[in-house]
Amino acid sequence: MKVNNVASIEQQPVDMEGAVGCKVRSLLSESDGTPTFAMRQFEVAPGGHTPKHHHAYEHEVFVLEGTGTVLEGDVEHPLSAGDVVLVSPDDVHQFRNTGDGPLKFLCLIPNSATGKSVTVVPECGLDLPSKR
Amino acid sequence: MKVNNVASIEQQPVDMEGAVGCKVRSLLSESDGTPTFAMRQFEVAPGGHTPKHHHAYEHEVFVLEGTGTVLEGDVEHPLSAGDVVLVSPDDVHQFRNTGDGPLKFLCLIPNSATGKSVTVVPECGLDLPSKR
């Protein structure tokens, strides 16, 4: 068993193409001994967003704090605390902070996502080559 | 993509042997199309607890609200909002609410947990036969 608090886990900037004002904490991952899936906490600054992108694995998201939207392709869904999102494999998606405070959410992925490619979609809607 | 709010998802009593004052919401599961793992939200009433038990699959837990403890065998770890717990396969564990308000936490399990047996451990420390 491992017990930890989110505040004691180091926060890293998300340096991925298309990410603005995003930080991430790795709460539980394979290096902690997770057999199947990993838990991360994202924090997006006001006006910031995750990359608009798609990949072959899922996200399971729980919104902890703040207000924003999640893009499903070009459709925007509003988000606030207590919202639950399943991003299915290959869904084009982006999380945006539309509020005045941080947007914080948990985002879980399968361990099998490690090393899988991610395709960033620029605002014009054309796919860029896979980055990682 | 699926977007939902926790408050709109039906809460069910946990009728498992050893559970006291526990309710659960299935936030995301195989019936929603999750490929790998399932997200549930548990709510334990003051004085209540989950069964003291073990099983061959992991839990990944994030505490949302309230105060309590998690037992790792006979060792108690205090819990409050923002705490993260990895319950590894076969760890004997129990979540207890020691506060005055509800203890709410997310608890994720692999889809492969479906149908796997769970062994309840009574307070005297002896295993009971597998119940489900």
Image (tube, coloured by chain):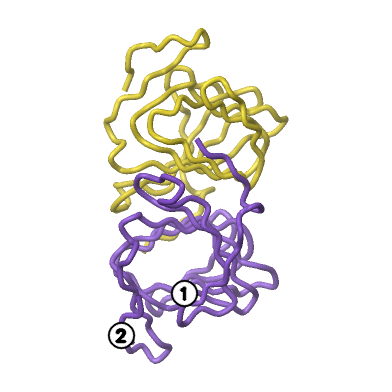
Chain colours: A yellow, B purple
**Mark 2–mark 1 contact, CB under 8 Å?**
no
**Residue depicted at x 50% and y 74%:** B50
Residue under the image location 42 percent in, 46 percent down: A39
| Other residues around mark 2 within 10 Å, as few (<14) / some (14–19) / many (≥20) | few
Q: Position of residue B26 (x, y in %)?
A: 51, 57
For the residues tagged 2 and 1, is the chain the same? Answer: yes
In the structure shown, which secondary structural element does the residue marked by tag 1 occupy? strand
Q: Nearer the viewer, mark 2 or mark 1?
A: 2
For marks 2 and 1, the one nearer the N-term is 1
Q: Hey, what amino acid is under mark 2? A: Pro
The quarter of the image holding the N terminus of chain A is bottom left
Amino acid bearing label 1: Glu
Residue under the image location 65 percent in, 22 percent down: A47
Left or right placement of residue B83 versus residue B75 in this view:
right
Determine crowd level at label 1: few under 14, some 14-19, many 20+ residues with C-alpha closer than 10 A: some
Label 2: element kind: loop
Q: Residue furthest right?
A: A100
- The answer to whether residue B101 shows anywhere in this view is yes
Q: Is residue B5 above or below residue A97?
A: below
Name the residue furthest front.
B31
Residue A22 percent across, percent down from the top left = 53, 28
- What chain does mark 1 sit on? B
Location of the C terminus of chain A (image quadrant): top left
Residue that mark 1 sits on: B76
Please provide percent x and percent y for residue B6.
61, 51
Report the chain holding disc 2: B
The numbered disc on residue B129 is 2
Q: Quadrant of residue A43?
A: top right
